[in-house]
Amino acid sequence: MSVAVHAPETAAPILSVRDLSVRFGSSRGPVLALRKVSLEVLRGSIVGLVGESGSGKSTLAMAVMRLMPSNATVTEGGIQFAGRELLTLPAAEMQRLRGDRLSMVFQDPMTSLNPVRSIGNQLIDIQYRDRQLSQFEKRRKAADMLRRVGIPDPERQLGRHPHQFSGGMRQRIAIAMGILEKPELLIADEPTTALDVTLEAQIIQLLRELRREINGSILFISHNLGIIAELCDYVVVLYAGEVVEQGPVRELFHHPRHPYTQALLECDPARIEEVRRELPTISGDVPNLLRIPAGCVFAPRCAKVYDRCCSEHPVDRAVGQGLVARCHLLAEGAGA
Amino acid sequence: MFAQPSDSVVTVVVEPASPGFIVDLFRRLRQEPLGVLGLTLVLLVVFCALMARWIMPYNPDKIKVVERFDMPSAIHIFGTDSLGRDVLSRVIAGSQIALGVGVFSIAVALIFGIILGLLAGYGPRWLDNFLLLLFDSVYSFPTVMLGLTVVTLFGPSLETLISVVITIQTPGYARLIRTATLSAKTSEYILAIRSLGGSPWRILLIHILPNIIGPVLIIASMDIPSVITLEAGLTYLGMGIPPPAPSWGRILQDGFDNIRDAPWIVIAGGIPLIFTTLGFTFLGESLRDLLDPKLRRIV
C-alpha cells in the first residue's frame, strides 16, 4: 500500500461491487445465484457477509477472485478493485493480483493445503513474483509470517507437511499464506466454521490484529452472527442471492429493519436470554433459485407479509443511521 | 495381455516423499511375504542384467555345433541349444533385453502419458476431446494385432518393438493422469493455490503432478512384466527381436522346436519369464497396498 499522508485513503473503497448478477447453467435451467448485488469494502475496514447456506456468499467471493466454476457467468454488473475493473482484466493480470494484492482464506483447512508439498515450499512458492529476494530471504519471510500467526518454532516447521499439523494450526498456516504478501483485501470464506470454539476465538483475534498490522481490508464471510458482531465494522445480509439489508454493524444488530435480518437475529442462540426448550427458527425454506418469486424474495417466509410483497419487487431504502434495507414495509404509508 | 487399469486406483493418495517415508516403506514391505518375494525376484533379474558380463559362464552367441543338445550338466548347467550355445548364458544375457524393453519402453510411455494426460486434463475442452479421441483410437486396437502389423510394415527390430510398446502403453497412462488431473483441478487446495496467484504451469507441475503420480507409477511397475511377456511373445512368433539376440522369446521358440530332443531349453527359457513376471507383479501389488491409506492395516 502506498503511503499517502495527504489523502484520506481510508474513505475510498478498495472493493466495489455494482449490480453484480451471476448465473449458473444447470441441467434444469439457469440458476440466478446472485441478482444485482452491490456492496463496498472501504480501505482498512472489515465487512461481514452473512447469509444462510446457498444464499450466494461463496459465489460472490469466487466472482471477486475470478475463480468461478466454468458453468457460472457474470450476466451484469461490475467489480472494481482499487479502481480497476476486475471482470474485464486479462487473465494473466488477474493472476498477478491474486495472492499479492487480493487473496483468500478458505473454509476447511483440512482440504485447502496441498498435501504433498511442505508448508515452507508452499510459502516460498507464493513469493515467486519477487525476483529480488533470495531463496534464503524468502524462507525467512515465510518463517516470520508463521511466527506472526502463532506457529511456534517456525524454522523447524517449514519442512513439515500439512498432515503433520492440527486443524487450528493448518488454518493459521492458510492465513499466513493469504496475508504473506500483505494484500490490500483478504477474503475470508468462513475461516472458522471448521474449527472448534476456542480456536475460532483465536483466529478472530488474529485477523483483528493482522488487519491493524498490514492495514488491509477483510471481506469476512460467515453465518455466525456472533463473530460478525465481534469482528466487523459493516454487515451485508444476503438472502437467496440478493442483498436484503446492509449497514454499520451496531445499527444493524440493534435496529434491524428487514424482517429477515430481524428473524435471523432472533434465531441466534447467543442472543436469546431466557432458556427455552425449543430454539426459534425461520419457518419455510430458502426459495428455489430456479423459480424466484415475483415479489420480495423473502415474502414466502416473512411473518409480516402483505399483498404488495408477493407482486412487486421491493427497492433499496435508506433508513436509520446508514442502514439500507429492501422491504416494502419501510415505504412511507406502508400498510403494516 | 495388458491389464486395463481400474478406476479405483486413481483415488489412491500417496503420502509425501521424505527420507523417513522411504525407510518406513521398506520396514512395512518387510512384513509382506509376497512383497519380499517380489522384491527378491526383481533384484535377482536386475542383478543378472547388470552383472551379465561377469556372471555368464560362456559367450551366449558362441556356436559349437558339436555340443548341440547337451543335457544339463556341471559344464552347461542349463544344457545347450540347437546350435550348441550355452542356455544359461543366453538366459542371463536375455535379462538385459527383457529389462531394457520392459523398463525403458514403459518409462518413455509413462513420460508421454504424463505430458498428454496433464494437457488433456488441464487444457481447454477441445484439446481434451481431441486427445481422448486419439487415446481411444489407439486403445481400440488389439495389442498383438497392432504389434504384428507394425512389425510386418517396418521389419522386426528392437526399435520397432519398443515403439510398438510405447504406442500401446501411452494412452493408458495418459487416461489415468487425465482423470486424476480433472479431479485434482477442482479440489479445494488447487483453488486455494489459484487464489494465491499460482500460474497454470506451476500449478500443473509442482502441485497437481506430485499429487497424482503415485498410483500411475505403481500401475506402470505392474505393466513391466506384461511388456516383457509381449516381447517374448512377439519374438516367439518371429516378429520381435531378430536372431541371434538371446531374447527369452527366442530361447522359448528354439526350445519349442526341439521339445522332444531337448526339453530343458523350454524350461530354462520359461522360468526366468515366470520369475520376472511374478516378481514385478508381487512387488507392484504390495506397493499399492502399502501406499493406499484406505487398505492400510491399523498397526
Image (cartoon, coloured by chain):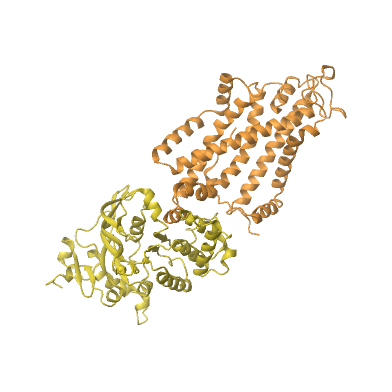
Q: Is residue B60 above or below residue A90?
A: above
User: Residue B272: x percent and y percent?
Assistant: 73, 33
Looking at the picture, tell me which residue is in the foreground, B25 or B203.
Answer: B203
Give the image quarter of residue A179.
bottom left
| Chain A color in figure | yellow
B100 vs B36, nearest the viewer: B100
Q: Position of residue A258 (x, y in %)?
A: 24, 70
In-image side of A226 versus B162 (left or right): left
The total of numbered circles placed on residues is 0
* Residue name at image x 54 percent, y 59 percent: A120
Chain B colour is orange
Q: Is residue A162 visible?
A: no
User: Residue lying farthest top?
Assistant: B65
- List x then y, in percent, for residue A84: 30, 56
Give me the residue at 44% from left, 33% from top. B133
User: Which residue lies at the image location 50% right of the left edge and 65% below the top edge?
Assistant: A145
